[in-house]
Image: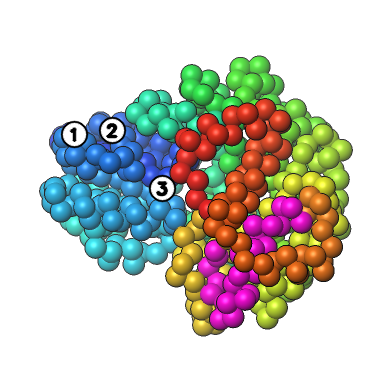
Amino acid sequence: MLSDNPSTKKNISKTLGKFALIHIGNDEVYGLEFVAAEIAASGHEFQWFDGEAADVIDSIIAYNANVVCFSPLTTFFPPSVILARKIKTRAPQMRMVFGGAHITASADHIQTDGIDIAVTGPVYGTIDQILTLPDKSVIQGTPVMPDKMTPRRREYFETIPRIGGRHRKTIMSHFGCVYACAYCATHNQRRVIGPKNYQQFYLTRRPIDHLIDEARILLEFKTKEVCLEDDDALEGFEAEAWMHEFVPRWNKEIGIPVYANVTPKTVTHVSDSHLKNFSELVHYVTMGVQAARPSSLKLFNRQFQKEEQIKEAYNRLKAFGIRVKMELIIGLPVEDPIGDAIDTIKCAQRIGAGDFGVAFPLMLYPGTALHKWCKDNNIPMNEECRFEWYSGVGSIKFEDPQIEKQIHNLSKLASMFIKYNIDERWMRALIKVDIPEEASKLMSQNCYLEALVARQGEAAKESFEEVLTNMNFRF
Ligand code: SF4
């Protein structure tokens, strides 16, 4: 029998807990919305706080929280810890709880000054333990079936207007991926809960009614597009039947434009009817191309991928009227990182020159297989990496500063190189120039704007300034 949500089964603690949920960053922290729902289901109360607001600590103290919850992406882990320490200094009785993928990646995080409790895996079954277990406990959550997982969104959007007002919102129909790329956190999720549980709990889709109800809330806030953040929107258990039912419901009852992520291999093996149905929902996808050289694909555990396969996937998507953004990874720990990066960009040019593509430097999250491989092979890691996509700064430290600079420049210029099909000689010359900070910022903003135009059309140009105002654009 499948597990029920533990919070609905167990005796709820008699003490009412007050949980402060901390938002940090430009995009909604989707995972914390599930935490909010679980807190409420466990009979406690919660309130959202903007972790970047000047008066956030005063506000949390005024709320008199028992527990302060953080679920930071790797990028926001350092500022989250700093904030937790500051809160702790002023209110030592408050308990700082950290969860999410970054924390799940390593039990060692519990040793970090400022973290009282670490939650690994899902939040389910942990709320009362958070209130009662001693400091420095690591609590492992219990996976539940997706029909027991529902986020609480409205309070978040109401309390933090810069998130409620964001043009883009997120939705997930399932939480796993069938692939096992060496740089991806799914590898660790699978390890933590075991492959069988992963299959059962992470690859089953959520009920359509739940997603539609969840999306109705998005209609009440400024939402121009929804990212179906499934790791691969076409994959998963009974994906075709699920989508066949989901697409007409979404189009009729919600109607907000949707974009999604896909993997070339999946695109080549789904049926025409599945893809047709998908194209009635999604007009724009991000397709991970990642690398071109076989040795680099092997390093990424994507050795199954061939250029012909990517081309076939690209052509199929186009044939169904779906626009494609190609995503590439450069700055790999290989002998010739510049040659490797240029080969990857040339591959994207052969597949879809004139189209939109981006290249990000390799960012390695703790707990991933490639992170471990780098450690085992004494690959120097770059302390400057802040896991900011548009920064051009990745995880690998190159001893030669020229290589570092050229990888940085390539990540800034790759979209232009692909769009205008720039010849290799010009690429190699242009990546040697010094890019001043203002130009670097504008290049990254152009890249972001092109992504918005590709998804939303020319109108995105008119609202771009407003989009930038609602976010702290990091480049
Ligand atoms: S396809 Fe995407 S989500 Fe799946 S393992 Fe690879 S990087 Fe992760």
Q: Which residues are magenta?
A: 393-417
Q: Is residue 199 part of the magenta span, yes or no?
A: no
Where is residue 414? Give x, y as percent.
71, 57
Please name whichever residue, 360 or 364, is drawn nearer the observer in this view of the structure: 360
Q: Residue at x 28, y 56 (%)?
A: 82
The residue at which mark 2 appears reads as 47
SS under mark 2: strand
Camera-near label (2 vs 3) is: 2
Compared to residue 272, the image places residue 348 above or below, namely: below
Q: Residue at x 34, y 67 (%)?
A: 108
Instruction: Give the quarter of the image for residue 248.
Output: top right
The residue at which mark 3 appears reads as 122
**Cα gap from disc 2 to disc 1, whole angstroms:** 8 Å
Specify the amino acid type for callout 3. Answer: Pro
- Residue 53 visible in the picture: yes
Please name whichever residue, 469 or 252, is drawn nearer the observer in this view of the structure: 469
Q: Earlier in the sequence, mark 1 or mark 3?
A: 1
Q: Quadrant of ligand 1?
A: bottom right
Q: Earlier in the sequence, mark 2 or mark 1?
A: 2
Where is residue 279? Give x, y as percent.
76, 32
Compared to residue 20, the image places residue 345 above or below, namely: below
Compared to residue 96, the image places residue 307 above or below, namely: below
Q: Is residue 407 part of the magenta span, yes or no?
A: yes
Specify the amino acid type for callout 2. Answer: Gln
SS under mark 3: loop
Instruction: Give the quarter of the image for residue 331.
Output: bottom right
Query: Number of callouts in the render?
Result: 3
C-beta proximity under 8 Å, tags 2 and 1: yes
Where is residue 19? Give x, y as percent.
25, 38
The residue at which mark 1 appears reads as 63
